[in-house]
Amino acid sequence: MAATWSATQAAAAGRDFAELHAAHGGVLWVEFDPASGRSSLQFLLGVQRRELTPPGYSVRSKVYEYGGGASCVTTSGVAFVNEADQQVYHLDLVGTAPQALTEQFSCRYGDLAFVPAWQAVLAVEESREPGEVEHRIVRLGLDGSRQVLVQGADFYAAPTMDETGTRLVWVEWDRPQQPWTATRLCQRHRSPAGDWSRTQVLAGEGGEESLQQPRFAADGRLYCLSDRHGWWQPLREGDNGLQPVLDAACDHAPAPWQLGGRSYLPLEGGGLLLSRITPATGQLLERTDAGYERRLATDFSRFRALAADERYFYCVAAAPDRLPALLAIDRHDDSLSVLAGGERPLDEVLLPRPEAIAFASGGETAHGYFYPAQGSGPTPLVVFLHGGPTSSSYPVFDPRIPFWTLRGFAVLDLNYRGSAGFGRVYRQRLQGEWGRIELEDIRAGVDHLADLGRIDPARVFVRGASAGGYSALLALAQGGYAGGASLYGVSDPLALRRLTHKFEADYLDWLLGDPQQHVERYRRRTPLRQAGRIRVPVIFFQGGRDAVVVPQQTESMVAALRDNGVTVEYRLFPDEGHGFRQAEHQAAALEAEHAFYRALLEAASAVL
């Protein structure tokens, strides 16, 4: 275990796992390597582990820009989306070269699901012809055939077929909705002659319900997650349609920014394997049909990519004290094996532990996780603002946080109102309020910790990436902070609105309102328009290939601050996009941000 924690170590700890499958007598998964920025398919059979993807291939979908569902197991191997060309390939386990299933190079693919009865793959297809982006659900045969099954809606997710190959269900939604605001659960039936019925809407027709992750149980009954009762909870098909399986005031999934989520599984006999989110921690539960719940893997606090076979439950799990791990949990005695990952990189005495906090803000309650600094007395504070902004932070080991706490900075990882994981009402609070209520929550969180004597309110820095960078800049414009950082942050929402992709084309209107009707609101909540109010130093990080927040947007903000005499640093990484993937660049950014804050603190101390 490490006695110190460098920026290089923090960046190298970014290895992660996704898309776990129990199949072919073993376990397959996608593994991201921060050193190369590549995602590979790994296969564990007994104690023998090998990589399936040949050199030159990386497993990653870019559908909706955020991807997901880039792999699925087939009868003889695995199908996957290759990052470079976004085409679907099939790979047998015997070591043959990948075989292309698609050659639609103007298309991207994601949310893959194999249909054994058809020997074909279901996928969401994103067609990107000049000036037009369309989405549909397609059938991709292992023989290279392609058939369009569903089209006409703006967006699709989670195409799922029952075991007989006769009942297709999926989730769809139309602009201006997002998948976490209002979606529809739909189905079509296929006759023995191959004819398809008309589309039937099973749930969500009223437009005030977000549905995700439809699944068929072994008995043929349909399950899905719905927030119709305020939380993403499992519903099960019965005589009266889809009905709640349980009554727990907790979400059982994060916001579906990515395709292919798997946060619950139907089990034989009517039971469920569930990932449950609570403010304090996450839980993995086995729930019987009679309602008895048994908690599993209690040392871990976030669970995703659930899978199961006759003997084990599998998941990608995270915890406050270790790196992400692939777990196998014995279904009979709950014993736990770590199949990959799970290293503990820091001695316990050096490890920052998350403290779940809740505090009053704007007449409501906001949430976050506080990580005290090493040392005693009120310390400087760095406020972390997650992206999204409809996303969330979790009480798990974030390799960036000990980098700060071991250098004398406390960290507040804020789940401001509008974050996911706290129910639909909390999540919907950002509608028309972005750029306002999260600023209230930043201020209220800092004041709460200052009142407790945990931090020094005169030495607070606010930082965020993407949407978090937007909020950080507006917070700095309000004043009361010592400085901050924007990592490819939004500084001009209207410029972003003109350039953004289809998936988020209406998101800014949901967050801020129609710019024609709310001209003054946009003025007040545009960091570039508020640059004259920022009087503290700011450091900016930007990817040269960022197509979401383009370099010009960040450079305009940098120029405006410099014109006003504000101390600014600007670090451009020419070959990075929106979100840095290369470990070398992640480490360089972390070191530069720390050096920037440390210099400000030393300058302030010298003045005193």
Image: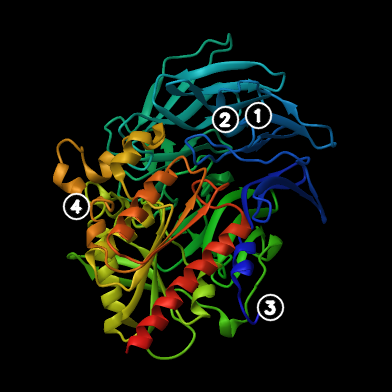
Find numbered disc 2 in the image and state the secondary structure of the residue it sits on. strand
Per the model, the C-alpha gap separating discs 2 and 4 is: 39 Å
Above or below, 145 relative to 515: above
Q: Which residue is mark 4?
A: 524
Q: Quadrant of residue 203?
A: top left
What residue lies at 47% left-to-right and 63% top-to-bottom? 282
Q: What residue is shown with label 2?
A: 109
Left or right: where 272 falls relative to 145: left
In the rendering, at what x and y percent does residue 515 appear?
A: 20, 38
Whether residue 310 can be seen here: yes
Q: Residues within 10 Å of mark 4 (few under 14, many from 20)?
A: some
Q: Earlier in the sequence, mark 3 or mark 2?
A: 3
Q: CA distance from mark 1 to mark 3?
A: 41 Å
Of the 4 image quadrants, the one containing the N terminus is: bottom right
Q: Nearer the viewer, residue 570 or 16?
A: 570
Vertical side of 513 occupied by 560: above or below = below
- In the rendered view, does 386 fall on the left or right side of 581? left
Identify which amino acid the numbered label 2 is placed on.
Tyr
Upstream in the sequence, badge 1 or badge 3? Answer: 3
Front-lying residue, 180 or 537: 537
Q: Amino acid at mark 1?
A: Val
User: Which circle, 3 or 4, is nearer the viewer?
Assistant: 4
Cα distance between the residues tagged 2 and 1 = 7 Å
- Counting labels gives 4
* Residue 75 in sight here: no
Report helix, strand or loop for mark 1.
strand
In the image, which disc is placed on residue 88? 1
Q: In whole angstroms, how far apart are the C-alphas of marks 1 and 4? A: 45 Å
Nearer-N-terminus badge (1/4): 1
Give yes or no for contact between labels 3 and 4 (Cβ–Cβ under 8 Å). Answer: no
| Residue 114 spot, x, y in % from top left | 63, 31
